[in-house]
Amino acid sequence: METTFANPGFWTYFIGSYAYYLPFVLTMVWAPLALFGLSKQKDMDTTKQIIWSLVILVVPVLGPALYLLLADKEYEKKFKQIAVGGGFGVFVLVWVLSLISHI
């Protein structure tokens, strides 16, 4: 059986579901980490905390990732790099696999 856009195969559905749900999963993991780290910061004024909260909540994947990489002081640098870099790495891998599965 030939896999086409009109008749997608198993791998197309499998990788496509990962590509669809992965941004939601990354947001569900990174946003609470970022908000928890933001709540623990005592040296940041209220205006900056409100702005960062809005960025984390309004910009789904990039907001929490930017906060964790640029402004967070709660978690170790290595943990933040692995969490954010690993998430983006998996996202790129799934995106490439989804492109390949359409060929």
Image (cartoon, rainbow, N blue to C red):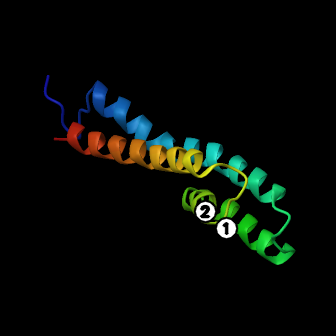
Residue at 72% of width from left, 47% of height from top? 32
Instruction: Give how far apart the Cα atoms at labels 2 and 1 are.
Output: 5 Å
Q: Nearer the viewer, residue 29 or 9?
A: 29
Kind of residue sitting beneath label 1? Val
Residue at 26% of width from left, 33% of height from top? 8
Identify the mark at residue 36; answer none if there is no mark.
none
* Quadrant of the image containing the N terminus: top left
* Quadrant of the image containing the C terminus: top left
* Furthest residue in direction bottom, as rendered: 47
Residue 63 sits in quarter: bottom right
Q: How many marks?
A: 2
Q: Is residue 25 left or right of residue 6?
A: right
Residue denoted by label 2:
63
Residue at 50% of width from left, 40% of height from top? 21
Would you place residue 59 above or below residue 92 in this image? below
The image shows residue 47 at horizontal and vertical percentages of 82, 77
Query: How would you rate the neighbour count of disc 2 (Cα within 10 Å): few for under 14, some for 14-19, many for 20 or more?
Result: many
Residue denoted by label 1:
55
Residue at 77% of width from left, 50% of height from top? 36
The image shows residue 93 at horizontal and vertical percentages of 33, 42
Q: Nearer the viewer, residue 19 or 88?
A: 88
The image shows residue 101 at horizontal and vertical percentages of 23, 37
- Mark 2 or 1 closer to N-term? 1
Would you place residue 50 above or below residue 77 in this image? below
Query: How would you rate the neighbour count of disc 1 (Cα within 10 Å): few for under 14, some for 14-19, many for 20 or more?
Result: some
Q: Nearer the viewer, residue 31 or 72?
A: 72
Could you say whether the residue bearing mark 2 is in a helix, strand or loop?
A: helix
Kind of residue sitting beneath label 2? Gly
Q: Is residue 21 left or right of residue 33?
A: left
Q: Are marks 2 and 1 in contact (CB under 8 Å)?
A: yes
The image shows residue 15 at horizontal and vertical percentages of 35, 34
Would you place residue 10 above or below residue 98 in this image? above
